[in-house]
Image: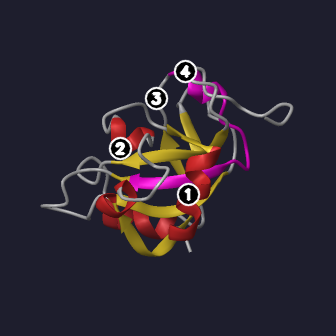
Amino acid sequence: MRPGQLVRRSDQAAFGAWLFKCNPHRRDFDAMLPTLERGTAWCVARTYRRELIAPDQPALLWVSGSGRAGPSPGLWAVGRTAGPVDGPQSTVDLRLRLLDEPVARDVVAQVAGLECLEVLRIPAGSNPSWVTEAEFAALAPLLG
């Protein structure tokens, strides 16, 4: 591990990226998509992780749900955090680029090295999820 590198408390895994989740039934999904590249404020859970989010960290956008009545679940965008968490609002600014094609949850689940990806193990877990350095490297070929 590099000096000053973020490490997950539970297993000492090195930080790779934040994975922000979007429930398309709780947010106007179609209206949100065009705002991603110019920046969008994203709500985060009030956990210790919000104190770890800093400007210019890798970020991923995961769409949750069943896909039956909306967009297919999986990875939709990649980018960076654009600032720290705004305390009172508990939001962080993100700059994200939509992937040419979303990467379906089922495809992500089949990638070697992603067996323990937090969003697959605990779909209703904290927002954001922690992606380890090794997991982010395994995802890289899917992100274009």
Could you tell me the amino acid type at mark 4? Ser
Q: Earlier in the sequence, mark 2 or mark 4?
A: 4
Could you tell me the amino acid type at mark 1? Ala
* Distance of label 2 from label 4 (alpha carbons): 17 Å
Give the number of the disc on residue 10.
4
- Residue count near mark 3 (Cα–Cα under 10 Å), binned few <14, some 14–19, many ≥20: some
Q: Which of the image's four quarters has the N terminus?
A: top right
* Distance of label 2 from label 1 (alpha carbons): 14 Å
Q: Earlier in the sequence, mark 2 or mark 1?
A: 2
* Distance of label 1 from label 4 (alpha carbons): 21 Å
Q: State yes or no: residue 63 in magenta.
A: no
Secondary structure, mark 2, is helix
Along the line of sight, which residue is nearer the eye, 128 or 89?
128
Residue 72 appears at what percent x and percent y?
Answer: 26, 64
Along the line of sight, which residue is nearer the eye, 11 or 39?
11
Secondary structure, mark 3, is loop
The region drawn magenta spans 47-62
Give the number of the disc on residue 45.
3
From the image, tell me which residue sits under label 2.
120
